[in-house]
Image (spheres, coloured by chain):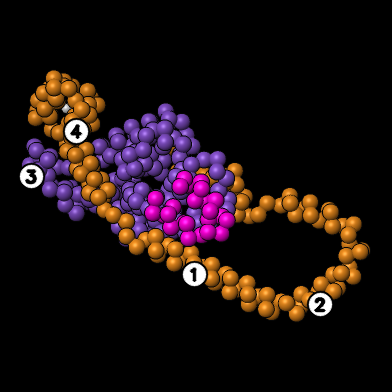
Chain colours: A orange, B purple
Amino acid sequence: MNCSSCQKQLESFIEGNASGDIQMSLKTHLEECEECHKVYTAMVITNRVISQEKELKVNPFISTRIMEHINQQEEISVNKNFELSRILQPALLTASVALALFIGISAGNMYQKTTTAQNSIPEELMLMNDASMESLNLIITE
Amino acid sequence: MSDFDIIKEILNGNKDQYRFLIERYQDQIFRACMGYVHCEEDANDLTQETFIKVYQKLSNFKFNAAFSTWIYRIAINLSLNFLRKKKGNLFDRIESALDSLTSKPQIQISDYSNPEDILITNEHTEMISKVIESLSDKQKTAFVLSKYEELSQKEIATIMEITEGAVESLLQRAKANLQKKISHLLKKN
Ligand SMILES: [Zn+2]
């Protein structure tokens, strides 16, 4: 067996999927060839490190932590909105009276304004592919 | 309850249902993040960040693709950004990659005739993490989704928005790079 066919079959050998004959000739080659043996060892070590990392478990409280964070964020934004409306309410009342007087004049322009608003896409949606799917941001090309 | 049903519930105001989505995907998202950052604490932080971002964007979810595809993409982008920030600019990245491959002391393995007996040390773990990190973003992503998540090439292709053939070639190149770099670092006494 030569080095390139040995290295091609190492993965199935390590996974225990190589047939008996191939296993034998791979073993013989690995005993004789230092280069292939290094590649073999590299693959074994890589697999072992990966399976060790895969055994680690996520923090068991993570869902609680995330839900707490989300609830806090929403409380903050609700409070902000409440504060804002408390301050703005008297102002809004005055403004709405003025607005009522103004509506007659500006009614003709309203239609145009609404259509413009619909045409402008919110900034966060523009960043997203299809406005629905997160696209992968793989900057470095091959 | 399906992912879509849960998402609809959340969007209808029943936000506590989000806990079920978290618990359904937390293990795989954590594992994928581990594949990128190789540090339990950072992977936990990235997992948390992923789920918070997903929640914030949930109203943009259009139900035309699997939720798992979407959440994987967000986790991958956050992990890659994390690595970029950690490593600084491109020049530093090249420097450190070269450093780790040339000037670092080589790992000594007195007898690796029987790899089952090789004791995996912290040095090994650090070496493997560095070498995986040195892969290009695309190779790394294909490798992590295949080796850590055990996803099929078809599933990886969907997440990465590339063809299955492209996934296969990324995986081949990733494995070849890893073998070359790691075996270079191994030295027989
Ligand atoms: Zn050989």
Residues under numbered marks 3 and 4 in contact, where contact means CB atoms less than 8 Å apart: no
Residue toward you, B51 or A141: B51
Mark 3, secondary structure of its residue? loop
- For label 1, the residue is A72
Q: Is residue A14 above or below residue B18?
A: above
Residue A14 is marked as 4
Q: Quadrant of residue B92?
A: bottom left
**Residue B106 relative to residue A32: left or right:** right
Mark 1, secondary structure of its residue? helix
Check the residue under mark 2 and report the chain it is in: A
**Residue A109 relative to residue A3: left or right:** right
Q: Is residue A123 magenta?
A: no
Check the residue under mark 4 and report the chain it is in: A
Give the residue at the far right of this rendering: A105
User: What amino acid is labelled 3 in the image?
Assistant: Ser
Between the C-alphas of marks 1 and 2, the distance is 34 Å
Which residue is pictured at 79% across the width and 76% down the height? Answer: A93
Check the residue under mark 3 and report the chain it is in: B
Q: Earlier in the sequence, mark 2 or mark 4?
A: 4
Q: Residues within 10 Å of mark 3 (few under 14, many from 20)?
A: few
- For label 3, the residue is B110
- For label 2, the residue is A94
User: What amino acid is labelled 2 in the image?
Assistant: Thr
Q: Earlier in the sequence, mark 1 or mark 4?
A: 4
Relative image position of residue B19 (x, y in whole percent): 43, 57
Residues under numbered marks 2 and 4 in contact, where contact means CB atoms less than 8 Å apart: no
Between the C-alphas of marks 3 and 4, the distance is 21 Å
Q: Residues within 10 Å of mark 4 (few under 14, many from 20)?
A: some
